[in-house]
Amino acid sequence: MSSDDQTNTQQDDSSLDVSILKDIAKKVLVDALNSVNGAKTLVLDSSLAGPLGLVTEVALLKHHGVDKMFWLESGPLTSTTTNIIYLCRPSIKYARIIADHIKKHLKDGKKHLYTLLLVPRKSIMVSRVLEEESVLGEVTILPYNLQFIPIADDVISLECDGAFKQLWADGDESIIYDSAQALDTIQRTYGQFPRIIGKGDYAAGLQRLATLLQRQAASAAAPDAGGVSTQGNIDSLIVLDRRVDMITPLLTQLTYEGLIDELVGIKNSHVELPASLLSPPNPPAASNVAGPSTSPPANPTPLAGLKKETKKKHHLATSTDPLYAELRDLNFGNVGKSLNRVARRLDENYKTNLQSKTVAQLREFVGKIGGLQTEHQALRLHTGLSEMLLPLTRTDAFNRSLEIQQNLLASYDVPAQITAIEDLMAQGTDLNTVLRLLCLASITGNGIKAKVLENIKRDLLQTYGYNYLPLLLFLSAPPLAILLPNPLPSFTPAVVSSLKYPFSGLRKSLRLLIDDTPEALDEVENDISFVYSGYAPISIRLVQCVAQKGGVLSNPAEKEKPANQTNDGQGKGLSGKVQAHPIVGWKGFEDVLVTIPGEAVDIALRGSGESSTISPISSLLRGREQATTTVVFFLGGCTYTEIAALRWVGRQNRGRKFLVATTGIISGNSLMESLKPPTSPATPAAAGL
């Protein structure tokens, strides 16, 4: 399938226009800025620069009165405007910095009007800190309810990087309330969730909050409206909390997009690349690249293994890249073949068009030049990016890590795998890689022998530094507890049962592992397991238990594919689609579900009538026969491989699309980084944007 065909198919079959959510976020920000009359200085939390760059641009901010912008950081703040607007997430650190700014201005006799926009809502904690600093009366505090941000046509994210740590390390459950509020906005925009299905204790808590908000919305509706609308295009909400499947993010992602995230780093849909890849010598081609300067700068992500070169931020988006939709979900082993196909097609197009003789043919060729140049530049970009990734995937550490992962998933000679992990540690392999492998060994094997684990922890601290002791404590203690000894410590029976993960049983009942024999290769390429070259993510198997039950125990794609049909490693070579079956909850998989720690949820919500306040776009959808949409929400983050696998499931069915919603995009590295103790680098000087 060509990139154009795939993009058109996605647009034609899509039942929800997620760009509405971007418009909502932009409008709320503009309204907040307009509430402050006159020119203003915007002081911005740097962690919000990336998310804001996905919903607005600097030019729009300036159009609504923003004169200058600065990072929110310690040190003096000099503003030439009377109005100063702070935009940040609620934290004690930022509250104290703001208080210091205000006290310094008051001491110097400077008169400013201060407005604090807190994302996503007002915080009592911030108010108390400002009150303790005796500056609360100087500040007007308002919420900026930044919720779901579209990062693809079928993916929306809260872009909250700290959600996982907040829940499973800090015990801060505020993200559950924020998620419930964001999901309520989905209902108000597209219609009620007729059914909420979930797995995990935090998923159950989110379901209860979402149900409460839905009932409140129904009771607040006009009496003649008849209650909450059930006429939207959403057939159900599936909620999975990350603790239900911790194995998937610990594995190395093997899709093109996932591998970019693993080895280069994707932040808020942007990646930092050498300038030579984004600014080629050919001016016409270069002009087709979306410049990174259109969005506020975000925190840089280091690009390991490459020569030092000027980097530019590039937005990975299918709207500006005609090849990205085709490449992003491929297993990396198939990317080269796909790029080769595109290169041959472009070469043939150029040769054919250059042979045009008549005026009409020449006119047609000229009309195609822009598109050909855009596609040519995309081909150049992804070829160069693939060439950057290839040597990184051929290092001894990378391949040894993959081998250990596959052996642990198959429970093959586990003591030898533990020894191999120790060898990697002795060789100074990246700490994140070592920790991911140790946690994977613990989860798949119900712990590591107590004496062996104690020795490993001691060696790890001696090798990498004793400052990582808090990290080991986070990994070893409930509620996270993914690096445990065997036998388990003297926890209460309830805690012990919640920590034991039945991986060996799930491996068989959910068909998680497919052999890497030549006979099984075709099955791998036509199953969600292609994202890990033979391993199916547990999270997506659970979604299949609800929305594609036949795909859990057998391979629907393989049944539909004719004997002479080929595929490209993404499960596209199908002769037809199967009509999606109705959502009937966990029916048929109750015995599997009960073995996985965490509460199971299956609530059918009832409502009647319609309310325009709940579904403002339902009138636009009426009369059009469209596929229903199943919203899958990952509480604690999801990986790019899970998104790719869910897209694969969506391609097998007719009549159902999936919308991925998440607190943020994660990887094993980002999880480990979030749990590490904070460092104390020198604070950079304030810089205007």
Image: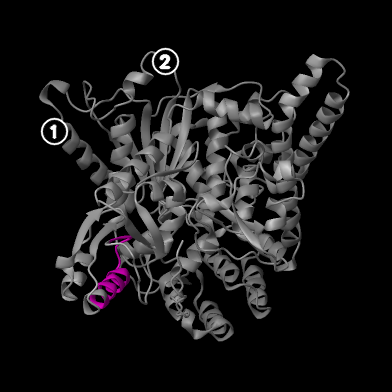
Residue topped by disc 1: 219
Q: Nearer the viewer, residue 332 or 309?
A: 309
Residue topped by disc 2: 624
Q: Nearer the viewer, residue 64 or 435?
A: 64
Q: CA distance from mark 2 to mark 1?
A: 29 Å
Q: Is residue 4 above or below residue 446?
A: above
Looking at the image, which residue is at 48% across and 57% down? 246
Q: Residue furthest left?
A: 223
| SS assignment at label 1 | helix
* Residue 519, quarter of the rendered image: top right
Q: Position of residue 6 (x, y in %)?
A: 62, 29
Q: Is residue 491 above or below residue 19?
A: below
**89 in magenta:** yes
Judge the density around disc 2: few (<14), some (14-19), many (≥20) Cα neighbours within 10 Å: few
- Amino acid type of disc 2? Arg
- Amino acid type of disc 1? Ser
Q: Which residues make up the magenta segment?
A: 83-104
Q: Is residue 446 visible?
A: no
Q: Position of residue 376 (x, y in %)?
A: 74, 39
Q: Position of residue 503 (x, y in %)?
A: 51, 54
| SS assignment at label 2 | loop
2 or 1: tag closer to the N-terminus: 1
Q: Is residue 425 above or below residue 641?
A: below
Q: Residue furthest top?
A: 623
Q: Position of residue 369 (x, y in %)?
A: 74, 30
Q: Do labels 2 and 1 touch, CB within 8 Å?
A: no
Q: Is residue 91 left or right of residue 372?
A: left
